[in-house]
Amino acid sequence: MLDMKGRKAVVAGGGRAAVRKIQALLSGGAFVTVISPAGSAQLEKWAAAGQIKWLRRAWQEGDARGAFLTFAATDDAELNTEIAGQAGPNQLVHIADDYEQGDFILPAVLRRGRLTLSVSTGGASPGLARQIRDSLSDQLPEDTETWLEFLFQARRKIRQRLHDPESKKKCFKKMMDPAFRQPERQAELLADVDGFIRICLTGGTF
């Protein structure tokens, strides 16, 4: 849960582990520089599309200068440790397969529209984290994305009209009624937010 939009990130390595990290960084809006003599077909596609800057060479000291975040994801454990040691005091580093030497770990992530679920085992077993994530995914109702989008829109409209915390709390609680999982009811509320607010504050049904 880190805002990487517009921030510089450096990834050392071009294998599968690096590709997973790059995909996450691009999804978060980061500016990504990849340093690796070779890489996968996916790296070629990203580089050709201008989505990443790819320096096709071995790592050199100073390559992480100015980066907010660095992934050391080469297949050389000693080099990964060396890269981590070059980080400045205000830089974050993740070392593939050796999270204890880095500054953070990566959870298994599930995204459904505005919903984000992350599962971490503290580095004990990334595989188990992925299994738990997939199990949670199977349990989510099919309407999760549309339900959350409705809640987001309704909450935003209510906050624009109300300033009293207790009044807002009443409306937020009311819109969680299972009846509003129905698309027709969602449309009714969004079309008449003021009417919904009056019902919330005075009682009755909407």
Image: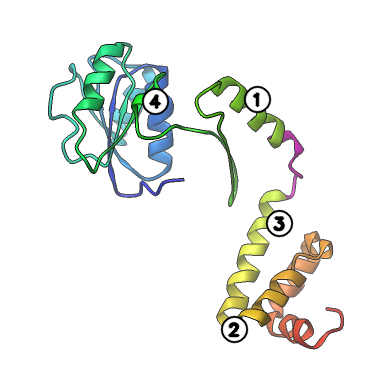
Q: Are marks 3 and 1 in contact (CB under 8 Å)?
A: no
* Residue found 16% across the figure and 29% down from its top: 63
Quadrant in which residue 104 is drawn: top left
Marks 4,3: beta carbons within 8 A: no
Measure how far apart labels 4 and 2 are at the Cα level: 48 Å
Query: Amino acid under label 4?
Result: Glu
Q: Which residue is mark 1?
A: 131
Q: Are marks 4 and 2 in contact (CB under 8 Å)?
A: no
Q: Which secondary structure, mark 4?
A: helix
Label 1 CA crowd tier, 10 Å (few <14, some 14–19, many 20+):
few
CA gap between label 4 and label 1 equals: 22 Å
Q: Using the image, determine if residue 65 lies above or below residue 100.
A: below
- 41 w.r.t. 158: above or below: above
Q: Which one is earlier in the sequence, the residue at label 3 or at label 1?
A: 1
**In the drawing, what numbered circle is on residue 100?**
4
Tag 2 residue: 161
